[in-house]
Amino acid sequence: MTATVATVADLDVVRPALRELARVVLPRDADDDVLALYVDGELRSTSSAPVQPGGVATTSTSSKGQRADQVLGRRRYRVPAGTRTSFATYFNAFPAGYWRRWTTVTEVVLRVRTSGEGSVGVYRSNAKGNSQRVDAVVVDPGGATSEFTLTLKPFNDGGWYWFDLVGGATDLVLEEAGWHAAPGGDAAGPGARPAGTATVSITTYDRPDYCSALLRTLGEADELVGVVDQVLVVDQGTKKVVDDSTHYPAAAAALGERLRVVDQGNLGGSGGFSRGMVETVAAGRSSYVLLLDDDVVVEPEGIVRAVVFADLARIPTIVGGHMFSMYQRSLLHALGERVQRWRFWWGPVANTLEDHDLGASNLRSTPWLHRRVDVDYNGWWMCLIPTDVVRKIGASLPVFIKWDDAEYGLRAGEADVPTVSLPGMAVWHVPWTDKDDAIDWQAYYHARNRVVAALLHSPYPRGGNVVRESFSIQVKHLLSMQYSTAELRLLALEDTLAGWENLHADLPGKLAQVRAVRAQEPDATYRTDAAAYPPTKRRKPPRRGRELEVPKTRLAILTAAAAGIVKQVRGVDELAETNPQVDVPHMDARWWLLSRFDSALVSAADGTGVAWYRRDPQRFAQLLRRSLAVHERLLREWPDLAASYRDGIEGLASVEAWRASLGLDRDAGTTAP
């Protein structure tokens, strides 16, 4: 490690050409809600300790807050005299462990240009979250560029670099800073490897205002010039983004000739993103296609970092961004996601936590954030895919929504293409807590696509626990009087058993069928207010005045299930047919509670409506018989079905299959069904 300091007058001296890996940036709108993701303050002890994965408490620290008025621009920041500012933050610390593991970079150069009195200190952490000072310099008050050459050798399992600024007798101003690939080696200079470019592909459906705002952000981001050569919007809605007279004109003006909008029928996320992949490959201009949801706020610097990371990766690599909550903007959804192969279900990588608030517990005070996290896939809210990978393994499965991104990551991994969820690359998105897509029309796609993905990729005979767990979920929905969900899940499995050959053909029209099936059931009918229903009445009060409690042991769960099933053979209370027995908030609407009632008012996840669930013993028995038969058949036919799906992957996902399905060869790629 070496450090040098140059005065402003020395800035014109010829230096080795370095490739910039990540610029230190500040929030575009100086938003206090996200400031903690960019800058941090002095650490101090607090009385409570955050819980780490596995339930281990650690010494807790928090930081003195920074203020939005200290943000002087996209790269400039004022540190008041006598105070400290740390850039040990999500967007501005350098995730050395990821660069060490996946790229050819062996050393990085940190350059920090300042004006005013003070000092620059450089720090590092290891995979355990322990930190140490690496170096520090006092800067020239007239202006200086401090340069530090830093090795990546110790970071095989994780760890970060960052720097702190300390104001002297006067304010210290950060003029700009950045992390660069050191000269020498495979990553030397911009000429060592060709710098790639990306086509940003956005799939939108009836969100013209969100989409226009996203387009404007992309168009006004100077850092994307020369990096993003086209923004392709696949508009599948009835409210077209080009018709948004309030926001779209400014967005279109900002992007100019880089913007292209194509219309096609609603083929879901998989159809929209596959269109983007196919179009990008056909154009032959971009090295990468970057998939973005339409309803996100993006940090543009993350796009640049993704392209550079992919350029310098040892082998072709998918580079994904993280998701923060649109509402609680310092809340990180997950650091990385994997598919548990026995259950074949997605979830956070082991030793990490979901929904971590970086505003409350920052990078330096959260040890598990320092361990490198290796993933199976990255969500397609923000994901960069090399076009060579698309040519090699194809585009998405034609599954409309759900599991398209997870299956693609698994397919890529089997083709020796890794996925990296890269810290410092992120969007803000509406959180999952405001949705319950496991019981609405999307339940069909959850059930079908999970099984399809397992048929393609499960390493276990007959899918491990997938079929048994699917049946367990089905019974829970039946006990909860969610007959529409149970019916959709049966349709999903029946369609899966029909074979892979129907997936492309079903893509345009399946949603209408799903909605029609769901609309026939009373639990799918919502009214805006509970007062629209008769008042709740119960013939008998709770036994001994005790309300139901969450079953916490296996015996308690089995007892609750047995009681619920026994209740299904009994007649329905006449009073429950005219009046709901109980009013259940969505957060409490679990099978072990709903199974004890004959009817209930249940709130929607987003709080906008209420449905009246009613128990129907005959409907329960009919659906249960069908469920038993379908799951028994799925388990019995699994080996042959899995072989068929795996043999059919070319017909499902290849660029040629998608071109045929989209009709691009017929009409030169301007429209689709």
Image: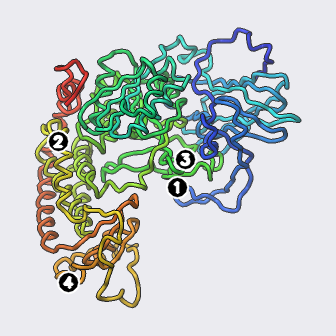
**Quarter of the rendering containing residue 163:** top right
Dot 3 or dot 1: first in sequence order is 1
Left or right: residue 629 versus residue 413 is left
Q: Which amino acid type corresponds to the residue marked 1 in the rendered image?
A: Pro
Dot 1 or dot 4: first in sequence order is 1
| Mark 3 to mark 1 CA distance (whole Å) | 22 Å
Left or right: residue 134 versus residue 546 is right
Dot 1 or dot 2: first in sequence order is 1
Question: Foreground mark, 1 or 4?
Answer: 4
Left or right: residue 549 versus residue 56 is left
Residue 53 spot, x, y in % from top left: 52, 55
Residue at screen point 49% across, 23% down: 254
Q: Nearer the viewer, residue 329 or 612?
A: 612
Q: Nearer the viewer, residue 291 or 43?
A: 291
**Residue for badge 3:** 329
> Mark number for residue 574?
4
Tag 3, which secondary structure?
loop
| Mark 1 to mark 4 CA distance (whole Å) | 49 Å
Residue at screen point 24% across, 83% down: 575
Q: Quadrant of the C terminus?
A: top left
Q: Which amino acid type corresponds to the residue marked 3 in the rendered image?
A: Arg
Please rate how many residues cluster around mark 2, counting C-alpha atoms within 10 Å: few if below 14, some from 14 to 19, many from 20.
few
Residue 14 spot, x, y in % from top left: 70, 8
The residue sitting at the front extreme is 245
**Quarter of the rendering containing residue 658:** top left
**Residue for badge 1:** 53
